[in-house]
Image (tube, rainbow, N blue to C red):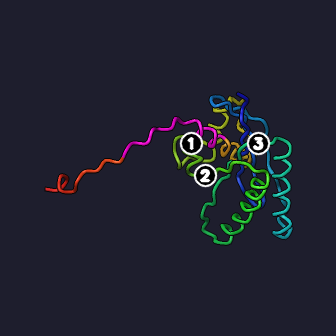
Amino acid sequence: MSPSLVLGIDPGTAVTGYGVVAFDGRIATLVECGVIRTTAKDPLPQRLLEIHEGVEEVLARHRPDTMSVEDVFYAKNVRTTIVLGHARGVILLAAQKAALTICEYPPAEIKKAITGTGAATKEQVQFMVARLLRLKSAPQPADAADGVAAALCACLLSSRPKLPELPAMRIPLSKLVK
């Protein structure tokens, strides 16, 4: 069985982190990671185009099977949340155009999959990304490590054994309440 490729994305309008991970069902290997940077003084539509084109370049270079994207977190500043949603939109558009399987995970779920706790710090996530991939140091910058973490989250959650679904038990209420 050939390894599947997962592209993980940490969306941002200034810096979008990404990581491509090969996964054979047991072992994950880092293929590439990096960031897509935009210029703060450029208008938002221009920045969104640059993010979209940057993601399309990574997709063309690696042809992944799956894209794992960090879901929107709700920032204190509503504008930040909305702008981040725009960035996610152009990223999801690129994935859909490439007919990828798309996985979306809240930041806490990614942290929990990688470190065991949804309240992990960025440094803890970076440390565990390096450990899980057997790297000498965490991918840099931190946004790239977050993209790799998103990819690893999809790998780890897809490889968990699925528990069989149990039949529903029907117990009359009269037996439960006396």
Label disc, if present, on residue 56 of the rendered structure: none
Image marks 3 and 1: residues in contact by CB distance under 8 Å: no
Vertical placement of residue 50 versus 119, above or below: below
Provide the residue designation for mark 2: 105
Labelled pair 3, 2 in contact (Cβ < 8 Å): no
Picture residue at 75% right of the left edge, 50% below the top: 99
Residue type highlighted by circle 3: Pro
164 part of magenta stretch: yes
Q: Where on the picture, by quarter, is residue 64?
A: top right
Q: Quadrant of the C terminus?
A: bottom left
What residue range appears in magenta? Answer: 152-167
Single out the mark in the foreground, 2 or 1.
Answer: 2
Q: Residues within 10 Å of mark 2 (few under 14, many from 20)?
A: some
Return the x and y of residue 74 as percentages of the image width and height. 60, 64
Eye-nearest disc, 3 or 1? 3
* Looking at the image, residue 51 lies above or below residue 44: above
Q: Residue beneath label 3, please?
A: 64
Q: Nearer the viewer, mark 3 or mark 2?
A: 3
- Asked if the magenta segment contains residue 96, the reply would be no
54 on left or right of 155:
right
Asked whether, in this view, residue 75 is left or right of residue 161, the answer is right
The numbered dot on residue 113 is 1
N-term-proximal mark, 3 vs 2: 3
Q: In the rendered structure, are the residues bearing label 2 and label 1 in contact, judged by CB atoms less than 8 Å apart?
A: yes
